[in-house]
Image: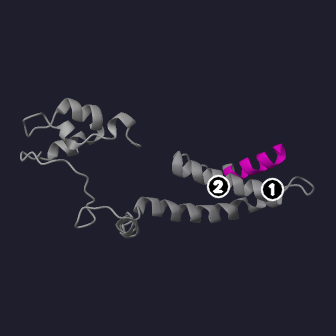
Amino acid sequence: MGPAPSHLQSLTIDYLIKENSAEWNLDRVRAVLLVHEREILQLIPSSSGAQDKFIWFPTSSGEYTTKSGYTEAVTTSVPPPNPDHDNLRTNWQSDVWRGLRRVKDLICAHQVGSPPVYPWTLWAIWSARNNRIFKNQIFSAAETATKALSDAKEW
């Protein structure tokens, strides 16, 4: 979402509430905070007419301090690991070792005096890993080895 544009930075909640009412101004909510519309509309605006103010919820006083900000940053829980991602990592690691055993002969058969293959093999493995995780493209060990040999020869 990023920082608010300069013309919106000084807005307070009362801008989003209809005048003389305890109802949200839907046009303004949608114009300013469309991505949070559902959450905002679940809140009930105050009908007491109290002045808006900034509140830092992690402290009982509502005031922000460097110490409270640091404490919040340190104690904020890290989301639990994603089991699917962990399984992908474990499967990927075993696939790499199994694949390396399969392609060892291809790499060892590479001609002496040719450019070194190991850096290209590592790069091909790393690229295949990234393609699997980020693009959901899966390459076999043989394809990865072939890519490494091709890149080495091209270099």
Display colour scheme: one colour
Please state which of residues 11 and 105 is positioned toward the viewer in this rendering. 11
Specify the amino acid type for callout 1: Val
Q: Residue shown at 49%/59% (left/top)? A: 88
Disc 1 is placed on an element classified as loop
The residue tagged 2 is 126
Please state which of residues 21 and 140 is positioned toward the viewer in this rendering. 21
* Secondary structure predominantly adopted by residues drawn in magenta: helix
Percent position of residue 124, x then y: 69, 52
**Which residues, given as a range, are shown in magenta?**
144-155
Identify the residue at the far top of this view: 27
Q: CA distance from mark 1 to mark 2?
A: 14 Å
Q: Quadrant of residue 61?
A: bottom left
Disc 2 is placed on an element classified as helix
Q: Badge 1 local density, few (<14 within 10 Å), some, or many (20+)?
A: many
Mark 1 or 2, closer to the camera: 2
Residue 46 highlighted magenta (yes or no)? no
131 sits left or right of 65 in the view: right
In what quadrant of the picture does the N terminus appear? top left
Percent position of residue 87, x then y: 46, 63
Percent position of residue 54, x then y: 26, 52
| Numbered badge on residue 86 | none
Q: Residue shown at 83%/58% (left/top)? A: 109
| Numbered badge on residue 117 | 1
Q: Badge 2 local density, few (<14 within 10 Å), some, or many (20+)?
A: some
Q: Residue shown at 7%/35% (left/top)? A: 20
Q: Residue shown at 52%/65% (left/top)? A: 90
Please state which of residues 126 and 138 is positioned toward the viewer in this rendering. 126
Q: Quadrant of residue 72?
A: bottom left
